[in-house]
Image (spheres, rainbow, N blue to C red):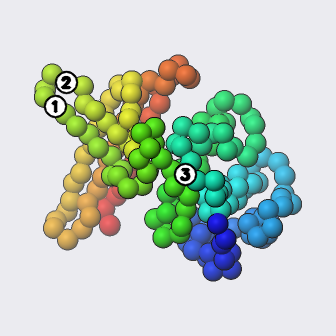
Amino acid sequence: MLVNWCATIPIIEKALGFTLHDWQKRYLYTGEYTAFGRATGRTTAYCIKLALTYSDGPIKIGDIEKHHDEDHGHRYHRWFRSFFLDIWERLKEAGLPVVEIVDKGGRVIGQEPLLIIEVKDMESVPVVRYKGEDITGKVRVGYQWRTKGDSDLGNHNILLEYVDKEQQSVQEINLRRLFT
């Protein structure tokens, strides 16, 4: 995909909530890194470019780790997936033409709700889909929404705890949207 970076960079910065370094902008234009080392913003720039210029069709959500920029082990790959999806989602919400991400069933991510909780009956385990992915190994599922009145969007609280069998630990997704 061809990107008009002059017009797109201000939209990116607004979507992410910070100003890109000059070297990150140069990387977006040229594809050449001039800053090296960890915690320099290199992965941020790489994820932006991947989200906006990847042209080999949709990326399967389970394959995102394969597109990592550096190799710092298995934990980095899992972190990269989450980090990329966060940037991808912000760019998509800003109206930028991002690469399609598809789930295991081939459904396009981002076209479904953020969170789906289905409860069949009081004797069943809830079925939970977060950002289009089934959450397995659930330990705790919590969702609360509250409003001050009929004119605000309300306060959302999402808490999902699940056992990650690969890391053999309990992972947590905890999101809050406060009153506005």
Question: In the displayed structure, does residue 15 sit left or right of residue 146?
Answer: right
Three-letter amino acid code of the residue under disc 1? Lys
The one nearer the camera, 72 or 66, is 66
Do the residues under discs 2 and 1 have CB atoms within 8 angstroms?
Answer: yes
In the structure shown, which secondary structural element does the residue marked by tag 3 occupy?
loop
| Secondary element at tag 1 | loop
Residue at 59% across / 39% down in the picture? Answer: 63
Q: Closer to the observer: label 1 or label 3?
A: 3
Residue 25, how many percent across, how many down? 74, 69
Residue hosting label 3:
58
Q: How many C-alpha atoms fall within 10 Å of the one at disc 2: few (<14), some, or many (≥20)?
A: few
Q: Quadrant of residue 8?
A: bottom right
Q: Amino acid at mark 2?
A: Ser
> What residue is pinned by disc 1?
120
Quadrant assignment, res 73: top right
From this viewpoint, is residue 69 visible? yes
Residue at 32% across, 29% down: 140
Q: Residues within 10 Å of mark 1 (few under 14, many from 20)?
A: few
Q: What residue type is disc 3 on?
A: Pro
Q: Residues within 10 Å of mark 3 (few under 14, many from 20)?
A: some
Label of residue 124 in the image? 2
Q: Is residue 25 above or below residue 99?
A: below
Q: Is residue 54 above or below residue 128?
A: below
The residue lying at 16 percent from left, 67 percent from top is 150
Whether residue 174 sits left or right of residue 80 in the image: it is left
